[in-house]
Amino acid sequence: MPDSDIEIQVWSNFDYEKLIAEIYYKGQYVALINQDDGLENLKIELPGADDDGELVLREIDLSVFEEALELARRELAK
């Protein structure tokens, strides 16, 4: 059963040629997936050390992270 605390936001950002997917868990930012190199070559970008610690999730269960990545991939493939 999907984790209802995972949120995927797909949108366009001027820093990228194609759509990106942002992953949030329990309202906190986890990662960004970009598809500028194609759906077969997705890239993950993790938050930097200077990102606001209250808005960024620094630790997440592996199974939740894997589920979030798969959901993001599916959203970008639509």
Image (cartoon, rainbow, N blue to C red):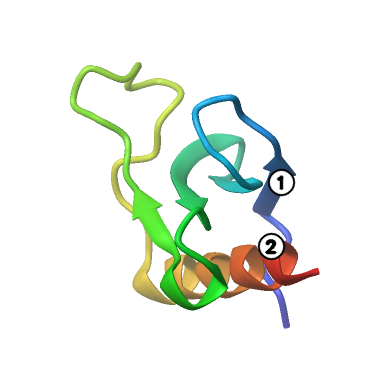
Q: Distance between the residues labelled 2 and 1?
A: 7 Å
Amino acid type for the residue under numbered disc 2 = Leu
Which of marks 1 and 2 precedes in the sequence?
Answer: 1
Which percent across, then down, holds residue 71? 65, 69
Q: Across the whole image, how many numbered discs are drawn on residues?
A: 2
- Residue 10 position, x and y percent, is 71, 46
Left or right of residue 57: residue 40: right
Q: Do the residues labelled 2 and 1 touch (CB within 8 Å)?
A: yes
Circle 1 sits in a helix, a strand or a loop, which is it? Answer: strand
The quadrant of the picture occupied by the N terminus is bottom right
- Nearest to the observer: residue 24 or residue 42: 42
Indicate the quadrant where residue 12 lies.
top right
Position in image of residue 18 (x %, y %): 62, 47
Neighbour tally class for label 1: few under 14, some 14-19, many 20 plus, Cα within 10 Å: some
Neighbourhood count class around disc 2 (C-alpha, 10 Å): few under 14, some 14–19, many 20 upward: many
Give residue 34's mark: none
In the image: residue 68, left or right of residue 5 = left
Position of 46 relative to 44 (above/below): above
In the rendered image, which residue does mark 1 sit on? 10
* Amino acid at dot 1: Val
- Residue 72 higher or lower than 74, as above or below: above
Going 45% across and 65% down the picture, which residue do you hit? Answer: 42
User: Residue 76: which numbered mark, if any?
Assistant: 2
Horizontally, residue 50 falls left or right of residue 24, namely left
Q: Quadrant of the C terminus?
A: bottom right
Left or right of 75, for residue 32: left
Residue at 69 percent of width and 62 percent of height: 76
| Residue at (66, 46) in percent of width and height | 19
